[in-house]
Image: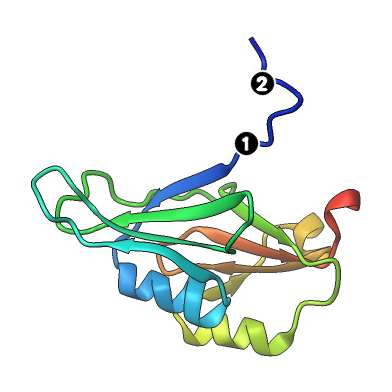
Amino acid sequence: MPLPRTTDPHLRIARPSRDLKAAGRFWVDALGLDVLWRATAGAPGEHDLLIVGRPGAHWHLELVGGEQLAVAPTPTVEDLLVLYLDGAVDDELVRELERAGGTRVSAGPYWDRWGVTVVDPDGYRLVLSTRGWSNG
């Protein structure tokens, strides 16, 4: 049965991270997302967590790390997290992301035309799109 149309589900993207401190520098300090939750593993079978996003938004990014991490990050060039900015990408923001461990890359003609792509410290691609979601 499909989701009811009246439901506005919360989207959670969960990814493994080799280094949550480096991830925090990229996603929080440089990009400007808020820390929604942070936890350190307290028992066997638990993981360290860093959850980032915007308070009140219907999405967040959960980064899972720590000594008990069972799966290493294995991103591909097609693993894109796209933020639709509906305007120009600030060059200083891109420099901040690079200083925080990111690497600017080409993501192909479409994304190169409509934004800037930066690989995060775990190898996942963040696209800062100049487009708005309605025309994305």
Horizontally, residue 43 falls left or right of residue 84, namely: left
Q: Depth check: give the residue in front, 40 or 106.
A: 40
Q: Quadrant of residue 97?
A: bottom right
Residue beneath the point at 50% across and 46% down: 13
Whether 1 is drawn above or below 44: the answer is above
Residue tagged 1 = 9
Residue tagged 2 = 3
Q: Position of residue 93 (x, y in %)?
A: 65, 84
Tell me the crowding category of disc 2: few under 14, some 14 to 19, or many 20 or more residues within 10 angstroms, Cα based.
Answer: few
Q: Depth check: give the residue in front, 62 or 114.
A: 62
Q: Secondary structure at mark 2?
A: loop
Q: Position of residue 65 (x, y in %)?
A: 27, 57
Label 2 is placed on what type of residue?
Answer: Leu
Residue beneath the point at 66% across and 21% down: 3
Tell me the crowding category of disc 1: few under 14, some 14 to 19, or many 20 or more residues within 10 angstroms, Cα based.
Answer: few
Look at the image and tell me whether residue 136 can be seen: no
In this rendering, the count of numbered labels is 2
Horizontally, residue 99 falls left or right of residue 58, namely: left
Q: Quadrant of residue 127?
A: bottom right
Distance CA(mark 2)–CA(mark 1): 9 Å
Q: Position of residue 53 (x, y in %)?
A: 55, 62
Q: Secondary structure at mark 1?
A: loop
